[in-house]
Amino acid sequence: MIINPLNVSGKEVYPLVEGGKGIAVSTGQSAGAWAAAGGIGTFSAVNADAFDEKGDLIPVIYHGRTRRERHHELINYAIKGGITQAKIAHEMSNGNGRIHMNVLWEMGAVEPILHGVLSQVKGLVHGVTCGAGMPYKLAEICSHYKVFYYPIVSSARAFSILWKRAYGKFTDFLGGIVYEDPWLAGGHNGLSNTEDPQKPEAPYDRVKELRRVMNDVGLAATPIIMAGGVWWLSEWQNWIDNPEIGPIAFQFGTRPLLTQESTISEGWKKKLLTLKEGDIYLNRFSPTGFYSSAVENEFLRGLIGRSQRQVPFTTEAFGDHTEELAIGARGRIVFVTPHDKENAQTWMAQGYTQAMRTPDSTLVFVTAADENQIVKDQIDCMGCLSACNFSNWAQNEAGTTGKKADPRSFCIQKTLQDISHGGNPERNLLFSGHQAFRFGSDSFYANGFVPTVKQLVDRILTGF
């Protein structure tokens, strides 16, 4: 073993954290097994699965006629699912390790969901990790329930803002800071507007600066959890027992997917074993507006193609927008450049006959079937985000962002529910960390070997 136990959430455990993955991917089953192995297991409370008295999955079906009605249904489902997964994780842990739950600050109704779950899981959940936004109220909520909180940040600057505005008032239950590398981690990433997605920065200096800021406010003994790009601990040996980094734990988000306890489909697990370097990359199609890291597949290629079939337009002739283009069933006239008209006519001849307007005064060209599906998905919105670019839902009195719904994006709830319940891994969004291609080359997984969580944790502890 090349790493020593660390006190996390009030108990000495291996500083190995299972990263939370939303919409029923990180379950109580996986989290409980990780904790039973002596680490910190994490289940997702983002629309988690619930089960009835017979142990059957309770299907998530919305009956409300309005978005707001469906939004309240979503809250009830999420609270019930979070409580269910906490109980499963607790039972499977056998009292070992620690159990954390993961939420996204930008998910719909995160505050009532946190209150709803935490009020019912006393003693079962020891910590809450939270990212995707600036979770100012996380500290107050977790402190109220005497549960440790672990904000996810991607820079020292982000932590400093959170500390000055909120966390400095609630230090007793600040369990640690998760540094999630915006170029290496899977799922939604915290790239700022000043950072280039194509120019990754090495994490060491960024974490060193985070530690300096933490030391300055009296948090020298508070652990940093390194998330993103962690595969073998031997590759991070210079971080361990390093005074510039301080107390350190390591988060594994991608590797727990390929375990016996992982509930993802066999098709998804097989897909992981075939990935090559370059198959995982950042994109900006998420309706959250954040960059996200996902596996290239039919779903992602479809979004790329849709966005490429895009032209700016004006409603009157202006500048170089001199060419008339008839769109829609009524043949309404818009104006585009000569070059863009040529492209549009080519796409329409290929079957992309429908021109859908975006919030940026552009048109994207899709098939009639795709248009019907996009419109249906937008109408069926249940408010799973605090604000959604795809459907224009927002968690405010008006229930809208005030902008046109964006057909270049997608319903994230729909695809993540599908993939987490056996959907086709080619036709759904597959979030993934950038190291996932290593499944295919790591000898640990030779001949398609899928370990138990205990086997994986034991392997990690060897350093390789």
Image (cartoon, rainbow, N blue to C red):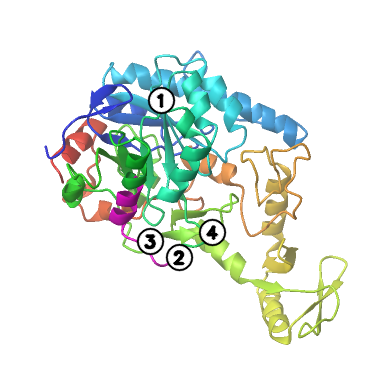
Kind of residue at disc 3: Asp
Task: Tell me the CA gap for discs 3 and 1.
Answer: 39 Å
Q: Residue at x 84, y 73 (%)?
A: 315
> Dot 3 corresponds to which residue?
279
Residue range in magenta is: 197-210
The answer to the question of whether label 3 and label 1 lie on touching residues, with beta carbons closer than 8 A, is no
1 or 2: tag closer to the N-terminus: 1
**Is the residue marked by circle 1 packed among few (<14), some (14-19), or many (20+) residues within 10 Å?**
many
Tell me where residue 133 appears, x and y as whole percent: 53, 44
Along the line of sight, the residue nearer the viewer: 11 or 379: 11
Tell me where residue 138 appears, x and y as whole percent: 51, 31
Task: Tell me the CA gap for discs 1 and 2.
Answer: 34 Å
Give the number of the disc on residue 173.
1
Tell me where residue 391 appears, x and y as whole percent: 69, 48
Establish if 243 lies above or below 86: below
Task: Tell me the CA gap for discs 1 and 4.
Answer: 34 Å
Disc 3 on helix, strand or loop? loop
Kind of residue at disc 1: Phe
Kind of residue at disc 4: Arg
Instruction: Using the rendered view, name the quadrant where residue 33 is placed.
Output: top left
The answer to the question of whether label 4 and label 3 lie on touching residues, with beta carbons closer than 8 A, is no
3 or 2: tag closer to the N-terminus: 2
Task: Tell me the CA gap for discs 2 and 4.
Answer: 13 Å
> Dot 2 corresponds to which residue?
196
Instruction: Using the rendered view, name the quadrant where residue 152 is placed.
Output: top left
Kind of residue at disc 2: Asp
> Dot 4 corresponds to which residue?
284
4 or 3: tag closer to the N-terminus: 3
Task: Tell me the CA gap for discs 3 and 2.
Answer: 19 Å
Camera-nearest label, 2 or 4: 2
Disc 2 on helix, strand or loop? loop
